[in-house]
Amino acid sequence: MPRAGEIVHATDVWEEPGGGGAVVAAQLAKLNRRCEFFTALGDDVLGRQCVVVLAELGIDVHVRHEGATRRAFTHLDANGERSITVLGDKLLPRGPLPLHGYDGVFFVSGDAAALESARSARFLAATSRELPTLRAAGVRLDLLVGSASDPGERYEGGLDVRLVVRTAGPEGGEADGRRYSAVPLPGPVVDSYGAGDSFAAALCFALARGDSLDDALALAARAGAAVMTGRGPYPAQISR
């Protein structure tokens, strides 16, 4: 990142739909061969372009258009680490949503009514980035995933949740206090954006289909490691 008064030059620039919801949906679609994504985007050209690109990734997109699409600059350094600058207000899907009968739902963002609709699924996972909404809805969670090092994802208890997983990047992480290991990267590090969300999506998928916790963590660790080797979150995500 530039220091005060400094000018830096990017070596490459590209743009694509981002955000935790899109990354989770793309990884679930690749593992499950289908994923329905309930989201909100701006009522603008950028928002409609995002729908087209997400559909090309194999995602069935259900979108509510309003306002302006939120944008973010993701800055990558030589080590593939990302720093993010966000522009604009966060747009949220609102409930109730038609989620009854789903085998698995991953809640990334939305209002309390959307989360209450998600609880009708057989297996419900959520990110700890949305703790205020999780507390407001008060629904039981089967899985809560968050980073152990990110202050915005720190969870200290208070929810009705069956399994809590805290990730620690190359150090692995812990599942309900039990340590698990990371896996070797399948190639050189290119971009860390989306690794945590791809890990969480794969973990949700595996547990929802009935895998053991050890097997689910192994799949999730492989999914997170794979993303580190691609430019952006989507090209290197693992598939079924």
Image (spheres, rainbow, N blue to C red):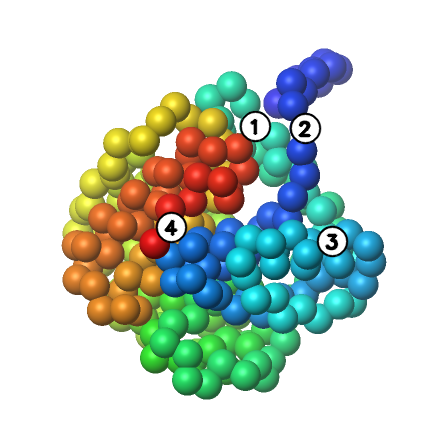
Residue at x 61% of width, y 66% of height: 61
Q: In the picture, residue 205 is in which quadrant?
A: bottom left
**Type of the residue with mark 2:** Val
| Residue 74 visible somewhere in the drawing | yes
Residue at x 54% of width, y 83% of height: 98
- Within 10 angstroms of label 2, few (less than 14), some, or many (20 or more) residues? few
Mark positioned earlier in the residue sequence (1 or 2): 2
Q: Which mark is residue 8?
A: none
Query: Where is mark 1, residue-wise?
Result: 76
Mark positioned earlier in the residue sequence (3 or 4): 3
Mark positioned earlier in the residue sequence (2 or 3): 2
Left or right of residue 142: residue 180:
left
Report, in whole angstroms, how far the alpha carbon at label 1 lies from the one at label 3: 24 Å
Residue at x 44% of width, y 39% of height: 236
- Within 10 angstroms of label 1, few (less than 14), some, or many (20 or more) residues? some
Q: Which of the two marks, 1 or 2, is nearer to us in this view?
A: 2
**Type of the residue with mark 3:** Gln
Report, in whole angstroms, how far the alpha carbon at label 1 lies from the one at label 4: 25 Å
The vertical placement of 150 against 26, above or below, is above
Query: Where is mark 2, residue-wise?
Result: 13
Q: Quadrant of the C terminus?
A: bottom left
Report, in whole angstroms, how far the alpha carbon at label 2 lies from the one at label 3: 18 Å
Q: Quadrant of the N terminus?
A: top right
- Within 10 angstroms of label 3, few (less than 14), some, or many (20 or more) residues? few
Q: Which of the two marks, 2 or 4, is nearer to us in this view?
A: 4
